[in-house]
Image (tube, rainbow, N blue to C red):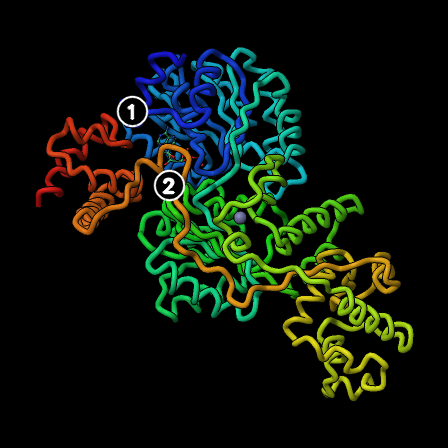
Amino acid sequence: MTSAPAYDVLQRTFGYSAFRGEQEQIVEHVINGGDALVLMPTGGGKSLCYQIPALVRPGTGVVISPLIALMQDQVDALRTLGVRAGFLNSTQDPDERRLTEQLFLAGELDLLYVAPEGLGVPSTQRLLDRGRIALFAIDEAHCVAQWGHDFRPDYLNLSMLHERWPDVPRIALTATATSATREEIATRLDLAGARHFTASFDRPNIQYRIVPKQEPKRQLLDLLRTEHVGDAGIVYCLSRASVEKIADFLVQNGIPALPYHAGLDARVRAANQSRFLREDGLVMVATIAFGMGIDKPDVRFVAHLDLPKSVEGYYQETGRAGRDGQPSTAWLAYGLQDVVQQRKMIETSDGDLAHRRNLAAHLDAMLALCETVQCRRAQLLAYFGQPGDNSCGNCDTCLTPPESWDGTVPAQKLLSTVLRLQRERGQKFGAGQSIDILLGKTTEKVTQFRHDELSVFGIGAELREQEWRGVVRQLLAQGLLAVEGEYGVLVLTDASAEVLRRERQVMMRREPERPARAPRARRATTGATAAATPDLDPAGAQVFERLRSWRAAAAKEGGVPAYVIFHDATLKQIAALRPGSLAELSTVNGVGENKLAKYGQQVLEALTS
Ligand code: ADP
Ligand code: ZN
């Protein structure tokens, strides 16, 4: 049974009627002083797991978060709820810092956000010694994993929390974790005795789609124009240069877009991030430097124009879509060049053999996801150790099942081209030349090297160029072919020989003629959100729009992102209910006491205007 105070805080402060999933058990465990390791997908509701215990237990909840640039927003959002929150980090001016310290010492803070590097500073440690700490929450706990892409050295020092404050409960939270990462978190944070809570990682409202990359810019534009008009979203690119290029391209085509990458001036980055959070319908074009901790709930799509380096990365990035449980799209365009480029990057990367093997294993898992003919979601969940249904009905392979075909003969033709170039001529070439040879094209380069005299010249006319690129890509993905050196030339692997000797069959994926397009992505079927977002009739939709314009004005006046005031889901519910009194309004999910007092009257007026 949950303690009455926890429910009270849930309802009065946050305005929610029920806990979601395991929140209740986690909250209870931490209130009672237990340590916890919480794995929950993005949007699962991790914050309440430490915020409620911090409010219920005496003292201040200290939240360790790497997201310095977001602390102000997080604190603002809590203050709107009537929670006494503050932060300490290096961006603060001394007066602000002193004030926060005084509030903490006086016991007048419910939550205090601290950057991990701050905790290593003796003066901060002494400060914490002098106040009363309700709990430590270690957010984004996967940052402690040394192989991970978000590794932060300062996280390694966090095991000292337990040594210095043995009686304070600790709760570590993350949305990314294979079982290996989970073990690493538990070990490095000294959380061996903690209770583990693992939620389902499924995000049913996200529709996963991976399409062959042909003309990526046009494909992206198509996606935005046909399915995501006016929506907020994130487009991920690998390089800073392509970020700039794509952002310009979108703007030229009338889509409001902003760039974000580590090469931009810190002020520009902060300004762009802030606009993305505050304004409606902006597209952020970014490298993976963007996104951790972005809790904008209405990101409607995440598009990848380049192949992510691992399934963990892909899942984390796509997870930023649809935190509000509404239908959202995760779209990835993937092609031969991606495989060549990533393999090349691994081959020429610094680090020892073990490190390169690790990178290669991560890439292989990502490639397997791209090339699968099975349900993408099933494969993703299996990767995170949560096998489930074999068919989700809301990914491209479920919506438009691709055929698999026996590609052994084309594979042999391609491999023997590579073999002949090497054996007979002592040459290595990239994919393009081998394909030209197979197609019997007398290009300048073919003539120059007299490749039209090879016995394999012109033996591949049964496939089109695009299909041959698919063959090369899938051979690379399956490790039956490799790339080498600066130019990414093709070379055989040990396994190639098995194919050439006819000892191994090669199954391939045939892309559907028309790739899957959303029959509007499915709604969340789990969690509180689904029930909280009824479909509106035309009159209700009008009211919803009116409420949205009221919210935009209120957000502007208060200098906070619109969703800090009320989420879309809450506005929709208000639009459906059209409450006539404050008491009725207070029954809506997401309307807590503080927000009711602050905005209630304005909402009622917007409804009757
Ligand atoms: P996470 O940190 O796990 O990504 P959040 O803590 O930001 O997720 O929660 C995701 C969204 O779900 C937020 O908008 C939050 O207000 C909402 N939420 C969390 N718990 C509940 C609940 N019990 N009832 C209704 N909404 C909830
Ligand atoms: Zn599926």
- The N terminus lies in which quarter of the figure? top left
Image-based side of 14 in relation to 301, left or right? left
Residue 473, percent across and down? Answer: 69, 63
The amino acid beneath tag 2 is Asp
- Please state which of residues 247 and 530 is positioned toward the viewer in this rendering: 530
* Residue to which mark 2 is pinned: 324
Q: Residue at x 68, y 58 (%)?
A: 342
Instruction: Examine the image and state in which quarter residue 420 appears.
Output: bottom right
* Residue to which mark 1 is pinned: 13
Instruction: Examine the image and state in which quarter residue 96 appears.
Output: top left
Image-based side of 373 in relation to 357, left or right? left
Residue 115, percent across and down? Answer: 49, 32
Image-based side of 419 in relation to 441, left or right? right
Q: Is mark 2 within 8 Å of ligand 1?
A: yes
Q: At numbered mark 1, what does the secondary structure look like: helix, strand or loop?
A: loop
Disc with the residue nearer the chain's start (2 vs 1): 1
Q: Nearer the viewer, mark 2 or mark 1?
A: 2
In what quadrant does ligand 1 lie? top left
- Please state which of residues 474 and 263 is positioned toward the viewer in this rendering: 474
Residue lying at the far left of the rendered structure: 609
* 575 lies above or below 428: above
The amino acid beneath tag 1 is Thr
Q: At numbered mark 2, what does the secondary structure look like: helix, strand or loop?
A: loop
Whether residue 543 appears in this view of the structure is yes
